[in-house]
Image (cartoon, rainbow, N blue to C red):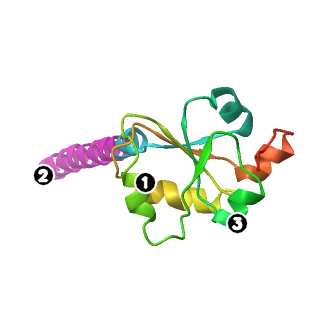
C-alpha cells in the first residue's frame, strides 16, 4: 500500500509537469508565430485611405498593369526572373503593399519577400478585383 501511494504521487507529479511543459511550449510557439509574421491582409478601403506616398507594388504582368492599375503603384512582375532582385532594391525602411488580380500572386510574393528587411508587408485582400468591386478607381 505504501509503495502504491508513492507511485501514484510520482505519477501525478510527472503528469502535471508534462502537461504544463507541453502547454508552455504550445503558447510560446503560437505567440512567436504571431510576432514573427510581417504579412497582413489589408482591405481595399483601408488601402485607399493610406494610398499616398506608400510603396505600392502591382505584381501582375506588364500587360495586366497597362490595362488598369491602382494609382501610385509600380509594376514588378512576380513572374520575372529578377523579381526578388527588383524588390530587394527598394527602400527597406518602409512598409510595402502588394496586390495582383485576386490575391494569389501577391500572397506568394509576400511569402517570398517576408525574410527581407521591410518593416511590414501588406497584401491587398481580393486584389485589384476587390478594389474595383468597391468602386475605387484605377488608372491606365
Residue 37: x, y in percent?
Answer: 42, 45
SS majority, magenta? helix
Q: Which residue is pictured at 45% across the width and 72% down the height?
A: 81
Residue indicated by mark 2: 3
Q: Which residue is pictured at 40% across the width and 36% down the height?
A: 119
Give neighbour class at mark 2: few <14, some 14-19, many 20+ (Cα, 10 Å): few
* Residue 40 seen in this snapshot: yes
Mark count: 3
Which residue is more in the foreground, 11 or 40? 40
- Disc marking residue 63: 3
Q: Nearer the viewer, mark 1 or mark 3?
A: 3
Residue indicated by mark 1: 87
| Quadrant position of residue 9 | top left
Residue stretch rendered in magenta on the structure: 1-28
Measure the alpha-carbon separation of dots 1 and 3. 19 Å
Q: Is residue 13 magenta?
A: yes
Say above or below: 20 vs 64: above
Q: Nearer the viewer, mark 1 or mark 2?
A: 1
Q: Tell which circle, 2 or 3, labels the residue nearer the N-terminal end.
A: 2
Amino acid at each position: 500500500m505504501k509503495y502504491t501511494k508513492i507511485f501514484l504521487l510520482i505519477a501525478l507529479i510527472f503528469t502535471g509537469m508534462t502537461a504544463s511543459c507541453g502547454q508552455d511550449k504550445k503558447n510560446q510557439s503560437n505567440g512567436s508565430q504571431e510576432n514573427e509574421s510581417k504579412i497582413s491582409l489589408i482591405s481595399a478601403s483601408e488601402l485607399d485611405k493610406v494610398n499616398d506616398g506608400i510603396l505600392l507594388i502591382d505584381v501582375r504582368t506588364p500587360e495586366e498593369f497597362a490595362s488598369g492599375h491602382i494609382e501610385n503603384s509600380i509594376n514588378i512582375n512576380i513572374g520575372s526572373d529578377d523579381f526578388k532582385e527588383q524588390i530587394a532594391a527598394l527602400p527597406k525602411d518602409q512598409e510595402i503593399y502588394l496586390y495582383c488580380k485576386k490575391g494569389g500572386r501577391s500572397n506568394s510574393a509576400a511569402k517570398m519577400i517576408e525574410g527581407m528587411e521591410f518593416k511590414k508587408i501588406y497584401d491587398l485582400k481580393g486584389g485589384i478585383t476587390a478594389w474595383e468591386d468597391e468602386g475605387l478607381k484605377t488608372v491606365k
